[in-house]
Amino acid sequence: MEQMKKDIVVIGGGPGGLAAAVTAARAGKSVLLVERNGYLGGQLGSGLPFLAFLDWKKRQVIGGIAQEFVDRLAKVQGTYGHAYCPFHLSTTLIHPFYARIIAFQIVKEAGVEILLHSELTDVKVKDGRIESVTVTGKGFHVELQADVFIDGTGDGDLGYMAGAECHKGQDDTHVMQPPTLMFNLAGINFEEFYDFIEKHPEELPYGLNMQNLREGYDADFFRNNPSFVFFGMQKLLKRLREEGKCPVARDTIIFIRQPIPGEVAVNTIRLLNFDGSDVHDLSSGEMEAHLQIPLLIDMFRNYVPGFENCYLTSINSCIGVRESRRIVGEKMLDYHDCLKGLKPDDTIALCSYFLDIHNGAGEDTTGIRIEEPFGIPYLCLVSKDISNLMMAGRDISVDPVTFGATRIMNVCMAAGQAAGEAAAMAVSEGKLPKEVDVQELRKHLLEQKAILDV
Ligand SMILES: Cc1cc2nc3c(=O)[nH]c(=O)nc-3n(C[C@H](O)[C@H](O)[C@H](O)COP(=O)(O)OP(=O)(O)OC[C@H]3O[C@@H](n4cnc5c(N)ncnc54)[C@H](O)[C@@H]3O)c2cc1C
């Protein structure tokens, strides 16, 4: 078996792992980033937008590497920048393929070594510390040693395999938010769609369980904003479900304008009672989700005004898992603190997004309003059980309600940046991650244009 030794090994190259690896390498450490796909960026390359770079008062709450990513996208016409939204606070479109290119650019420039097509297959732990991990690709095994390991798998695979305590789903039911396979459509007559929405405001989510919704989410907003994310059509879907003509178990349609003329990304497939960390669910889910696509396209063509001539242009490379494991950290963020907008002294990233909970066992979605951005404490990124394990991305230590907000990609990047910087400091100072001086870490993050207060 090949052996490699690095200062820091990051498993998973999505928004969290990518930001952590690049930040640690920029701090001068030797970093290896392992990714099971042939591309980097995870869900950044799926057609999804960044949400809530801004808060309700239109103050920017996330900077650092996430903003750098947007600036790089803007240079290649891969985004229109941050646009205020009365529903999602702000939307920032992402060209899915440029996102993957930029991910490679920043990794290469920072000097991060990469192992693609490689999946984590084994973890050796001694005395509560990861000694090595094994990754496997094409029947070839590589054993990796490092001072600090960062779990950027989204699903907390590394923490789980190391024996760290992990939580899944809601505390009482363990139901997890449902997955969605994203796909893109073109051939849409947008003017016809806006006219329909203007005549049928009951199709907008006013009246649904969405506290975050504010006035102004209407046909004119869609007409005048090239970065919109549409959420609604509940009356139509209710009728179609009753008539047996709706192929998905959800009460609303979501589609996202793309920075590609004429295209939208559809975020509407829903699979219920699904566990994204179970390969059996993933296997049947991929099949079921792909088979839902032509049925959904037929539904759009037949019943959604403006979509009569829509056609399929792409399908994301795999199903998107909203929720699976969260690794329990030295601290766990409680949603009561989020609702109060607390920003503790050890805040390493802010979040202003609402508590957005898609029901994994039913058709609805709940949105709980966040009035004031809240802070994510540093020790939510540090495993309580494994001394040299950190988390970057949606697997950080938060309760399942807070997770509804912290799972968004720019927050994953901001927390990933903090994890990468802290890991680099721990290596330089010969400390454990939990011993890192948080005020010094915050100073470094501010120098990197992170936003830690508003
Ligand atoms: C359908 C859907 C809609 C969403 N909508 C939005 C939205 O509009 N805006 C928004 O900001 N967020 C949205 N989110 C949430 C957001 O996309 C994710 O929470 C976020 O991408 C998580 O980042 P991450 O880095 O933790 O994980 P991911 O983006 O999932 O990346 C994890 C990476 O790790 C790799 N990996 C996983 N396991 C292993 C392993 N064992 N070995 C090696 N590599 C591995 C994966 O291939 C992947 O590249 C949505 C999520 C879904 C699924």
Image: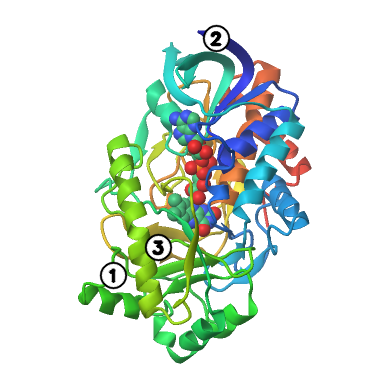
Comes first in the chain, label 3 or label 2: 2
Amino acid type at image mark 1? Cys
Task: Tell me if 445 is positioned left or right of 335 in this view.
Answer: right
Residue 232, image x and y in percent? Answer: 42, 74
Label 2 near label 3: C-beta < 8 Å?
no
Crowd tier of the residue under label 3, counting other residues whose Cα lies within 10 Å: few below 14, some 14–19, many 20 or above: many
Question: Splitting the image into 4 quarters, where does residue 246 fall?
Answer: bottom left
Task: Check disc 1 and report the residue beneath it.
Answer: 246
Q: Residue at x 42, y 18 (%)?
A: 122
87 or 317, nearer to the observer: 317
Task: Check disc 2 and report the residue beneath it.
Answer: 2
Where residue 268 is drawn, which disc sits there?
3
Q: CA distance from mark 1 to mark 2?
A: 51 Å
Amino acid type at image mark 3? Thr
Question: Splitting the image into 4 quarters, where does residue 27 fall?
Answer: top right
User: Judging from the image, what secondary structure is the residue with disc 1 in?
Assistant: loop
Q: CA distance from mark 3 to mark 1?
A: 11 Å
Comes first in the chain, label 3 or label 1: 1
Q: Residue at x 32, y 55 (%)?
A: 291
